[in-house]
Structures are given as structure tokens and as C-alpha cells.
Amino acid sequence: MVSVSYQAVFNDKHDFREEIKELLKSAFEQNYDDFSEEELESYIEIHYEKQIDNYKYIIGFEINFDEIGTEVTKIIEDFSENLKGSKKIILVLKFYDLDLLNFLLDIYKELFRIEMKLKEIISFIFIDTYKSGDNLLKNVNLKPRFEGKNNLQKDENQRREYL
């Protein structure tokens, strides 16, 4: 199941569920041939609605997609664009997108893999250079982090001395 969480500010009192369903229906029509009104209705879960002034209402809702035969990412993108393009909605925020989370997790895994390879290369260089496996940093002149107030950005003399 893929879930996406939204918050929208509507410019007037509407049947919010129906408005959301119509925008979702439009996204499905662009990407998917076989769906029903009941199916679309089952995807929508409204968490809260609150009037924030005379003509504005804030609605928190979630779209929960079952496994469907087309690319869910495209439907989410089109639905988000439909929300942004609606004349009845002043502001829309997307908070939780499981599909995006999975994509970012793949990126983070790749970054972690690269970081571990870099660590392996750096340790190889240190071991090869110092011909020892114990206390690789004992002969390396590392300066401790500057103690005291961080005036390095302001004081050019301190910065030169430190570096």
C-alpha cells in the first residue's frame, strides 16, 4: 500500500471529500483505464477539517493506494498537480509520501555504500603509508577544534594561525 498525506486550505465551504475525489478521478483518468468511483472513494481518508476564518477551511487528508497496475508515482504527481491547480484550493502541502521515502532510502543506501568504500580506501592509504595497523593517526598532525568563541570567521589573523 502506498500512502500520501496532504493538508489543503480551501477558499470556501465545499463538499471536501467530493472535491478531492474529483481531483483524484482526473489523475486516474490520465493514467489508468480501469477504476470505479467506489474504489476512488475508498482511497480517501479525511483526518480533520477546521474553519480558520469566514471563508477558509483547512483539511487534512490521506490517499491510500492499493496495489494498482500502473505507476503509482505518476498518479501521485498528477493528483498533486491537480490539487495545486484547483481554483478552490489556496494552499496545498504534501507531508508523507511512502513512494518518495522508498526512493530516498535507495539514495541513502547508495551514499552509505560510497562512504564505506571511501573509508576503506582512506584506511588502505594510511596503513600503506605508515606500515602499521595500530594507531594510524599517531604521526598525523591533526589540530583540535578551535576552543573558545568562534571568531575565526571575523578575525583574519586567528584564521591564518589556525589554518
Image (spheres, rainbow, N blue to C red):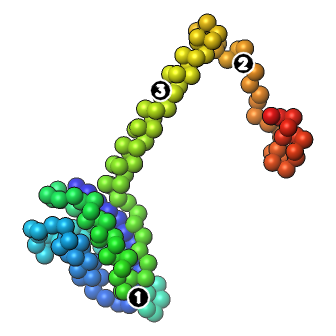
Label 1's element? loop
At label 3, the amino acid type is Lys
Q: Position of residue 118 (x, y in %)?
A: 51, 27
Please state the horizontal and vertical placement of residue 107, each as a whole percent of the image.
Answer: 40, 44
The residue to which callout 3 is attached is 117
Q: Is residue 160 above or below residue 34?
A: above
Q: Name which residue type carries label 2.
A: Val
Q: Which residue is mark 2?
A: 140
The residue nearer to you, when weighing 52 against 39, is: 39
Q: Residue at x 20, y 75 (%)?
A: 25
Of badges 3 and 1, nearer the viewer stands 3
Q: Earlier in the sequence, mark 3 or mark 2?
A: 3
Q: Secondary structure at mark 2?
A: loop
Which residue is farthest top?
Answer: 131
Where does residue 99 sit, x and y in percent of width and height? Answer: 31, 54
- Spatial CA distance of label 3 from label 2 is 22 Å
How far is the residue under mark 3 from the one under mark 1? 53 Å
Asked if the residue at tag 1 contacts the one at tag 2, i.e. Cβ–Cβ closer than 8 Å, the answer is: no
Tag 1 residue: 11
